Image (cartoon, rainbow, N blue to C red):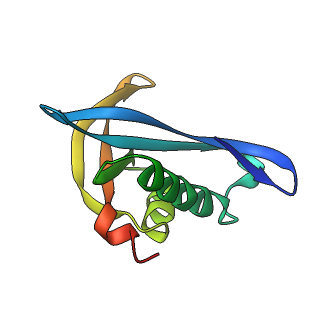
Amino acid sequence: MLVVSDDERVGLVAWRKIITGQGSYCWNVGINLLPEARGKGLGTQAQRHLVRYLFAHTQVARIEADTESANVAEQRSLEKAGFTREGVLRSYAFRDGEWRDAVIYSVLRSEASSW
């Protein structure tokens, strides 16, 4: 889905299915914003809209997101969007010649129903 501000495309949100067990899954969501669109609350708002959309149109009980541990701005955005920090995933992704830790967040259907 596109993130739009004042009729301008400034980024996108996406999701992918994560198999969590036999016959069950959750969504993992992510966002990418243009640098000039960051820090204005657009990411928080877009992620909250995406969560509402996915819970309204699918049967999942959980939506999760992860980000590099150094990405403090995205961690704040996820928390403002209603996600709960669950923990650190050590050496989760290899980028720029090194293994990097990530932080995982989630929001449950029961938590989002009060939004």
Residue furthest top as drawn:
97
Please tell me which residue lies in front, 57 or 63: 57
In the image, residue 111 above or below residue 58:
below
Q: Quadrant of residue 85?
A: bottom left
Q: Quadrant of residue 19?
A: top left
Name the side, left or right, on which 35 lies relative to 79: right
Residue sitting at 40 percent across and 22 percent down? 97
Residue sitting at 37 percent across and 46 percent down? 66
Name the side, left or right, on which 61 lies relative to 79: left
Q: Does the rendering let one see residue 115?
A: yes
In the image, residue 1 above or below residue 4:
above
In the image, residue 36 above or below residue 39:
above
Residue furthest right as drawn:
7
Residue 113 location (% of width, % of height): 39, 71
Residue 11 location (% of width, % of height): 69, 43
Residue sitting at 46 percent across and 55 percent down? 56
Residue 105 location (% of width, % of height): 32, 55
Residue sitting at 87 percent across and 57 percent down? 6
Residue furthest bottom as drawn:
114
Name the side, left or right, on which 38 lies relative to 62: right
